[in-house]
Image (cartoon, rainbow, N blue to C red):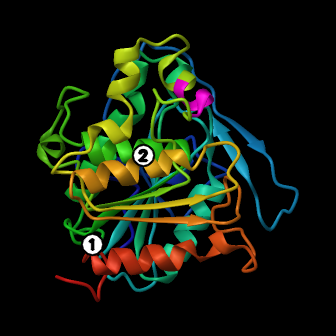
Amino acid sequence: MTPPSRRAILGGGAILALAATPLAGQVTAQDEVIELWPGPPPGSRGTKITRSIEQKGRDPAHPDRWIRGIARPLLVVRRPARPNGSAVLLMPGGGYGFLSYDNEGEEQAKWLNARGITTFILMYRLPAEGWDGRGDVPLQDAQRAMRTIRAGAQRFAIRPDRIAVLGFSAGGHLAGSLATRHAERVYAPIDATDRLSARPDLAGLIYPVISLDAPFTHGGSRDNLLGKDAPAAALRARSVERRVDATTPPVFLVHAADDDLVPVANSVAMFDAMRTAKRPVAMHVFEDGGHGFGTRLPATQSASAWPGLFVAFATRQGILPGGPA
């Protein structure tokens, strides 16, 4: 495939050379970095937001960077050697207070690329960093990202009806919000890209935050998204299990029973809501794995099996080659 020009246009988003982006240190010179918004993002106050990267890993071969200060939301493209036409939009977690970029972005892209799946890591804005309408800021970026990917389907050699989303922890809340609120208008349309559907064709929610108004919610994600003492109506409106309807795409859920940060009750609530709505759903609750395991678990821990189960589910739903057309 022909590499992108230094500044090409894709569905209203610019594909930028590395030197022109604020992501130096996360990507390489061969990567495409797509800026989502042609001007200031929705809700911009002109607040100065400074990028910070905290290295949490001790092994240089396995970095674990936590990223904050996202003034310009971006998609980082990871292409497979032999694309099979399917794509996944990746949403790292971090309690809406940072992005776990390597564990839930880069490392996920690697195993998906190895299976021929084109991936897009979403560097979404963090709601408490100075935006108006903070409760919808991440979803604005998620909707725009899905539309941008669809607008560039031909360029990326992907099918516009085979685009999944895969989210982790608070990124799972965002992925679930996109799956259930894809048609909700959370920003004013700005170009032709915004006439496209933001609905993912499948949603994988990995140890996700789901409910914001139940006793088992993750308080940090809730407060970072909406602020402390948010009205009950705002909590209900952003509780994913309450938004499931007949248009919600198939959902794949993974949780570990020993997760002591985001209780497994979150996944159970989403599973029950999907079953009530008679929507396709699979849930895997593993004995061990804790929280934030990504793909780092040894084979001796049961939750390490989830990537293969995700591929099997996506294949059955026709999102990966080999399943129904």
Q: Residue furthest right?
A: 58
Say if 196 sits above or below 322 in the image.
above
Magenta-drawn segment: 218-222
Q: Amino acid at mark 2?
A: Ala
Q: Which mark is drawn over residue 158?
A: 1
Q: Are marks 2 and 1 in contact (CB under 8 Å)?
A: no
Q: Residue beneath label 2, please?
A: 269
Q: Amino acid at mark 1?
A: Ile
Nearer to the camera, 209 or 162: 209
Q: Is residue 272 visible?
A: yes
Circle 2 packing at 10 Å, graded few (<14), some (14-19), many (20+), is some
**Residue at image location 25% in from the left, 28% down from the top:** 186
Nearer to the camera, 262 or 173: 262
Quadrant holding the C terminus: bottom left
Nearer to the camera, 125 or 36: 125
Asked which quadrant contains residue 59, the reply is: bottom right
Task: List x then y, in percent, for residue 316.
Answer: 30, 80
